[in-house]
């Protein structure tokens, strides 16, 4: 696939989100540099998906700004933000199960079509040419992610791992400058995780697209992220290179589940089909989140 040259910086500054009495994000700032993989991590309920909802225009923060190449995103509706090249996937799969993979991917290109509903419905020559061009691009993107052979199958018939890859492909069909991936390997086995890791690297290196990655799989995060921001209870507790963040005492404390006063951390958000296992209590010998120093990152 051909790639774009350089993309804008995403600058998140002082973002605060409240739900009734709960502060889900508290004055959070970080920057995603162009062409990098930036991980946003933290225990269950830390505010990661809430941040994605702010970045994609689903939630409006009570304070703060999100600048993408100098354009303010706060206050813009989701379709306008997508039009600026910000594409996302969802933590819970959000495909149309009865539609084919190809149809799901074509929806990602809707904002790029010019023929419109009537032109397409009347099968005008221009509309037919445009449709053909978009289908060719959809095929190219599907092959790039290794799902080219699944295009004519109903999305709902695919395995969980394949559906997650279709979601990534649909986000790529937007032709984004930045891709927001919310737990792209949750529920995948090691082989599928390795494929997604390769795809993320290829997207960054082949297309120059920046990636903001929310993920609980620390092997993946530490293997591919250029920079890591850590949230806990809505606050940013660390930000920096993976090697520095992984040894930060406050990060280790947050993940081990002892609150800031030594109290047990509150229960995580209710588990859903796509949620990872809950973070274990400190009594567990080997927390699920823990990275293994000797473990090879997925290739
Ligand atoms: N629409 C909402 N209304 C009320 N509270 C919400 C809403 N969305 C999120 N929250 C709360 O905000 C906090 C942050 O939730 P969020 O989903 O952003 O966490 P997360 O870091 O993505 O967690 P996980 O790793 O479990 O996906 C949680 O306490 C959650 O219950
Ligand atoms: Mg989440």
Image (spheres, rainbow, N blue to C red):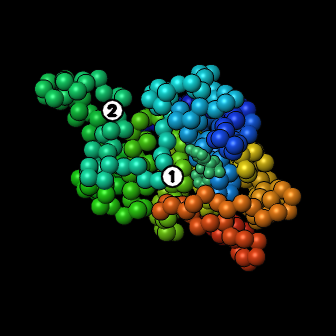
Which corner quadrant holds the N terminus?
A: top left
Q: Secondary structure at mark 1?
A: loop
Which corner quadrant holds the C terminus?
A: bottom right
Q: Is mark 1 within 8 Å of ligand 2?
A: yes
Residue placed under numbered mark 1 in the picture: 91
> Mark 1 against mark 2, which lies toward the viewer?
1
Q: Earlier in the sequence, mark 1 or mark 2?
A: 1
Residue 88 at what x, y percent from top left?
49, 42
| Residue drawn where x is 67% and y is 62% of the image | 267
- How far apart marks 1 and 2 lie (CA) works out to 22 Å
| Residue drawn where x is 69% and y is 34% of the image | 15
Residue 135 at what x, y percent from top left?
26, 39
Q: Is residue 72 left or right of residue 238?
A: left
Residue placed under numbered mark 2 in the picture: 110
Q: Nearer the viewer, residue 180 or 226?
A: 180
Can residue 275 be seen from the camera position used here?
A: yes
Q: How many marks?
A: 2
Q: Secondary structure at mark 2?
A: helix
């Amino acid at each position: 696939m051909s790639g774009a040259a350089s993309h804008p910086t995403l600058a998140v500054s002082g973002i605060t989100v409240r739900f009734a009495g709960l502060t889900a994000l508290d004055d959070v700032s970080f920057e995603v540099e162009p062409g990098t993989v930036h991980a946003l991590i933290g225990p269950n309920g830390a505010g990661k998906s809430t941040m994605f909802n702010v970045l994609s225009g689903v939630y409006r923060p009570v304070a703060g700004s999100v600048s993408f190449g100098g354009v303010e995103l706060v206050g813009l509706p989701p379709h306008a933000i997508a039009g600026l090249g910000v594409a996302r996937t969802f933590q819970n799969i959000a495909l149309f199960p009865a539609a084919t993979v190809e149809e799901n991917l074509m929806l990602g290109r809707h904002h790029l079509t010019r023929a419109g509903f009537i032109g397409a419905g009347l099968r005008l020559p221009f509309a037919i040419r445009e449709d053909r061009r978009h289908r060719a691009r959809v095929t190219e993107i599907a092959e790039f992610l290794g799902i080219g052979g699944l295009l004519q199958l109903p999305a709902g018939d695919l395995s969980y791992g394949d559906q997650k890859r279709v979601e990534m492909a649909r986000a790529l069909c937007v032709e984004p400058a930045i891709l927001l991936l919310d737990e792209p390997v949750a529920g995948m086995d090691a082989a599928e995780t390795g494929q997604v890791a390769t795809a993320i690297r290829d997207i960054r290196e082949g297309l120059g697209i920046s990636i903001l990655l929310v993920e609980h799989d620390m092997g993946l995060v530490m293997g591919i992220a250029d920079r890591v921001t850590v949230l806990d209870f809505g606050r940013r507790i660390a930000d920096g290179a993976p090697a520095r963040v992984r040894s930060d005492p406050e990060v280790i404390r947050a993940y081990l589940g002892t609150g800031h006063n030594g109290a047990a951390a509150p229960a995580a958000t209710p588990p859903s089909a796509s949620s990872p296992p809950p973070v274990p209590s400190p009594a567990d010998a080997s927390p699920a989140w823990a990275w293994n120093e000797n473990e090879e990152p997925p290739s």
